[in-house]
């Protein structure tokens, strides 16, 4: 099912942790139980990124969201990762200005792996991706 945007928003700048799975429907209940989190059953298909995503909200105030990321097809950038069992993929931070955040990351030696683009799960708000020198994949979500 596609919707306009997620309704849950964490309190701080640390927005979510992304975890790649082969199937959201086969994984979500185990994640929700283990993380003591709620699931609103929304699954977003994002053709720009080649994935389907869904979010879990912790029952503990102040925690970031958990995002389950499923490849939309065999061309998905996370397909091979999911086929190998998936796992922890990225962290996401909300930023005020995407261009400034990318410039700051670049000045620290990060590679921009995906230029700004609208994201279906965030109602068209722009995201971008960086890869740091210490091999951390970070998604920036523009406020």
Image (cartoon, rainbow, N blue to C red):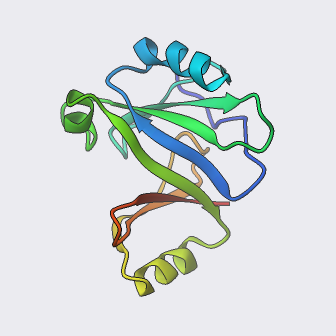
Q: Quadrant of the C terminus?
A: bottom right
Q: Quadrant of residue 113?
A: bottom left
Is 100 above or below relative to 120?
A: below
Kindly give the residue lying farthest to the bottom in the view shown: 107
Residue nearer the viewer, 34 or 64: 34
Q: Left or right of 42: which side holds 74?
A: left
- Front-lying residue, 85 or 44: 85
Q: With 75 as the anchor, is 116 left or right in this view?
A: right
Asked where in the image residue 85 lies, by quadrant, the reply is: top left
Camera-nearest residue between 75 and 67: 67
Residue drawn at 66 percent across, 44 percent down: 64
Residue 3, position as x, y percentages in the image: 60, 29
Residue 81 horizontal/vertical position (percent): 24, 37
Name above or below for residue 140 compared with residue 105. Answer: above
Residue 2 at x, y percent in the picture: 53, 26
In the displayed structure image, the side of residue 84 where residue 54 appears, left or right: right
At a point 43% along the width and 21% down the height, the residue shown is 24
The answer to whether residue 85 is left or right of residue 62 is: left
Q: Can you say whether 97 is above or below 14 in the image?
A: below
Q: Residue shown at 62%/73% (left/top)? A: 97
Q: Is residue 106 above or below residue 125?
A: below
The image shows residue 31 at horizontal and vertical percentages of 53, 22
Q: Quadrant of residue 21?
A: top left
């Amino acid at each position: 099912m596609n919707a306009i945007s997620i309704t849950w928003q964490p309190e701080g700048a640390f927005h979510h942790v992304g975890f790649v799975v082969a199937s959201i429907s086969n994984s979500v209940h185990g994640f929700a139980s283990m993380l003591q989190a709620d699931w609103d059953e929304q699954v977003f298909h994002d053709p720009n990124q080649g994935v389907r995503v869904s979010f879990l909200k912790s029952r503990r105030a102040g925690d970031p969201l958990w995002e389950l990321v499923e490849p939309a097809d065999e061309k998905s950038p996370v397909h091979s990762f999911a086929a190998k069992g998936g796992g922890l993929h990225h962290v996401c931070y909300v930023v005020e200005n995407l261009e400034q955040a990318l410039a700051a990351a670049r000045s620290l030696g990060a590679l921009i792996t995906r230029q700004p683009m609208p994201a279906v799960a965030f109602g068209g708000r722009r995201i971008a991706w960086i890869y740091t020198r210490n091999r951390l994949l970070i998604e920036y979500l523009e406020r």
